[in-house]
Amino acid sequence: MLGSAPVRTPLALYLLALVARIAVAAGFPDPAYPDSFYYVDVARRIADGHGFSVDFLWIFAEVGGRIPANPVLPIPSNAHWMPLASLAQVPFIWVLGPTAMASALPFALFGALAAPLAWAIARDAGARPLVAVGAGLMTAFPALTFAFMAQPDNFSFYQPLVAGALFLGGRGLRGSRRDFALAGLLAGLATLSRNDGVLVLGVLGLAFLWDRFRSWRSWAGEPRRPARVPLLAAIGAVVLFAAPVVPWLARQVAVFGSISPSSASGKVLFIRDIGEWNSITTPASLDHLLGMGIGPLLMTRIGGLGNALLIFTILGCAFALAPFMLAGAWKRRSDATFGPYLGYATVLFAFSTLVSAVHVPGGTFIHSAVALLPHGFVLALEGVLATVGAIAARRSTWNAAQASRVFVTGTVAFTVIAAVAGSFATHAGWETKRARMQDAAAALNAVAGPEDRVMSIDASGYRYWSGHGGVVLVNDPLDTVREVAQAYEIRWLILERSDSVPAAAEILLDGRRPAWVGPAVLEREDVGVYPICTMAGDPRCDGGTAVSPGAAE
């Protein structure tokens, strides 16, 4: 059993993973993209006593997918994202202040648990000690997802919680009723980190049904066996899942009138491409989705699956691990230890194909897929051993034991090197974005009043860097952009070259300003900061260099 193993190995793996995550956080301590900016902004609002609220609107899906009848700021937060990643930061902000490292530390501390968990998974599966330690090291340095593990995002909570739930579910299928019930609790906590955690509860339900099916009939000539997951354990899993989740859902209903407010607008499920996610004029209904035609609809679903496979192969497997992971999965396909894991992998890829296909390239999939890595690294090393064994059986000159050590060590080393090199490359890209946002924020703060609101493609990011609330730049014609600006009394507009919206193309790239956009206070090839004049007589606008077609005067 696990209890007989020396404590020093899992402890050493935890400490190594913790140091690695703190180091990567020190290399880039700030949030790097909208999700992590949002979680930090919400955490700081909670720490300051404002509760779950934000003074910006990062996506209109949070307020019904359109300009609301009463367009006000601040608004209740978390109509789309779950609360755990923000709540975890609050005690650290109280102690250390609203600093970048205060937000990063809880993710390093909790996320490091995944490394000893991978070791435990391997031991519980009867894998060799070489595989157990190797999988722990690989999870401490999880290939090209490593840089994300120190971000104030849900990666570092979702991964160990889901992997832990699948681990306990596998133990439940082998007779541990207590572990099966506890798997429900971890699935519930995972759901507070990310909505996809509910898929884990579904997988546990499928595991229970599979166990019952196996107890009712023989399988491939095998005799019947008693059910290993009692009904009471399954009920316990549901009750423990509900314990952390139901209070949050009750809050959602009380505040928004729905358990999934952003989905109620249709923007999550019924958009044809990711560009519509940020539009308030494009319909978001089932009729709109089906109206694209069966051929294009099927292509979006196929594209979702293809993108999910590609993303996991690149980020999770650094390309080279993928075939070995598949070989290990085939080798262990009948092992109950990996049953819930293989079930979750199947359900996640199916969900990404059928439901969230257009969101997959934007990061939705990899946030959930990191939970596949602890088990996946065990299977990858099992696949290496199986491959070495097959080759050694045909080559008399090979020493199978020695070759196994060499190739497992090489696989672990490759993963660690990929993680470190990948984090440097990722940080370089993030640094370019950070410098651009800091320059724009500095230019804005030099001229803006303390209460001025800003419109930008990343409202949560510019809230973090400038201190100014505001709204997202919608992916709609300029007259709609002006309507949004007027509704929310926006005074400044930040455009980035990478913004794929009409405003960025016409104003920043083409240099054609409508009458309600004034001369830039900062204008570079990559970013521009402009005053917005939606009130008559505002002296900051000069009538524009040219009125863009369709723009409102």
Image (spheres, rainbow, N blue to C red):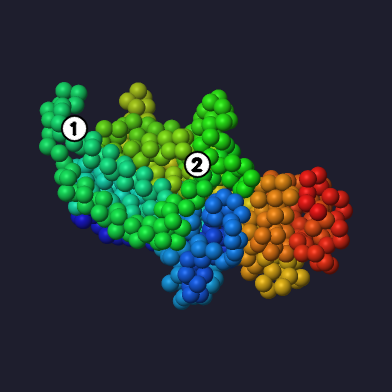
Q: Is 288 drawn above or below residue 502 in the view shown?
A: above
- Give me the residue at 76% from left, 70% from top: 447
Alpha-carbon neighbours of circle 1 within 10 Å: few (<14), some, or many (≥20)? some
Q: Is 45 drawn above or below residue 516 in the view shown?
A: below
Between residues 405 and 171, which one lies in front from this camera angle? 171
Position of the C terminus, as image quadrant, is: bottom right
Pointer 1 or 2: first along the chain: 1
Between residues 236 and 88, which one lies in front from this camera angle? 236
- Give me the residue at 65% from left, 67% from top: 468
Q: Is residue 484 visible?
A: yes
Amino acid on which the number 1 mark rests in the picture: Arg
Amino acid on which the number 2 mark rests in the picture: Leu
Residue 83 sits in quarter: bottom left
Q: Which residue is mark 1?
A: 214
Asked if residue 375 lies left or right of residue 6, the reply is: right
Asked if residue 265 lies left or right of residue 199, the reply is: right
Q: Where residue 480 sits: x, y (%)?
A: 70, 50
Q: Which residue is mark 2?
A: 269
Q: Where residue 157 sits: x, y (%)?
A: 41, 56
Alpha-carbon neighbours of circle 2 within 10 Å: few (<14), some, or many (≥20)? many
Q: Which mark is residue 115?
A: none
Q: Where residue 126 sits: x, y (%)?
A: 24, 42
Asked if residue 8 lies left or right of residue 485, the reply is: left
